[in-house]
Image (cartoon, rainbow, N blue to C red):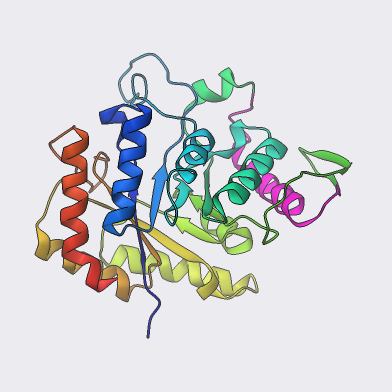
Amino acid sequence: MSKRMELGALVPFTDTGGDPSLVRDFAQTIEAVGYDFLEAPDHVLGGKPTPGQTIADEMFHDPFVLLGYLSGVTTTLGFSTGVLILPQRQTALVAKQAACLDVLSGGRFRLGIGVGWNPVEFVGLNEDFHNRGRRSEEQVQVMRALWAEPHITFKGRYHTIDDAGINPRPASGSVPIWFGGHHEHTLPRIAKWGDGWMPNAYPPDQTALDIFGQLRRMTEEAGRDPASVGIEVWTSLGDGKEADWREETAFWKQAGVSHICVTTTFGRRHHKRIAGKTLADHLAALKRYHAAIADLL
């Protein structure tokens, strides 16, 4: 029997705002409905409104603050970042924040990471936009070392740590690291170091099956079990009916997907956002979707 897929929802706070009671009500409602996890996006800075600039006026809570708060008002709901822009941050600090969230939530956290696309954020945070991919590889190695051992000595191209460590560390000795993105270098990084992949570019068709197969081959070539690397896909609720949702869910199940994240605000590529923008609109859509597909997970 295949393993049950986990079902999550992306926070809609760019529509609804981030009032504390709203944030709490959203998390507690989807937990009560039966969702397994909540996913939070990340942007520190937004640029001036320009063509193609989509984050100028949108609201983003800091993911660690948001998920730390929500871990205290929920009991079983899991959390993930979708995705944290890792190379615009200090590595040891992210390792510390992720470890603290893991401890305070009782191990309910996955760290989804990406390399970002907006130079404005990197300049404003005094980080190099142009080597962000290469740096992120070393960042993952540094974080894994800090989570695993009380003190580490690390000398790399971008990091130097001289017999130092973080406290607390995650009880399991690690925090799951999931990579976002679709760059040609993403799959090799996942195959070597990742616990999962979070793509949103592929519709439920042969293109998805082909790229999933490529990841599994690369993971095996890296000496790891492909079954140990999860895949999270995004599905959007702005189009289709119950029968369409069930067909898509069955496709992802057959494809070996481990997590589905439902989006109500995302509208790029093949995804379409819902028409409504209130909290009630988003929760109604999420309840309808869960009722339609829960038995297929």
Image coordinates of residue 271 in percent, x first then y, are 23, 47
Asked whether the viewer can see residue 237, the reply is no
Compared across the picture, whether 213 is left or right of 193 comes to left
Q: In which quarter of the image is residue 204?
A: bottom left
Tell me what residue is drawn at x 40 percent, y 46 percent: 39
Report if residue 133 lies within the magenta region. Answer: yes
Instruction: Tell which of 70 and 40 is nearer to you.
Output: 70
Q: In which quarter of the image is residue 190?
A: bottom right
**Magenta-highlighted residues:** 127-152
Tell me what residue is drawn at x 17 percent, y 48 percent: 285
Asked whether the viewer can see residue 290, the reply is yes
Tell me what residue is drawn at x 52 percent, y 23 percent: 121
Instruction: Tell which of 291 and 43 is nearer to you.
Output: 291
Q: Can you say whether 113 is above or below 124 in the image?
A: below
Farthest residue, direction right = 163
Q: In which quarter of the image is residue 106?
A: bottom right
Tell me what residue is drawn at x 80 percent, y 55 percent: 149
Image coordinates of residue 273 in percent, x first then y, are 20, 41
Image coordinates of residue 142 in percent, x first then y, are 74, 47
Q: Can you say whether 252 is above or below 264 in the image?
A: below
Report if residue 273 lies within the magenta region. Answer: no
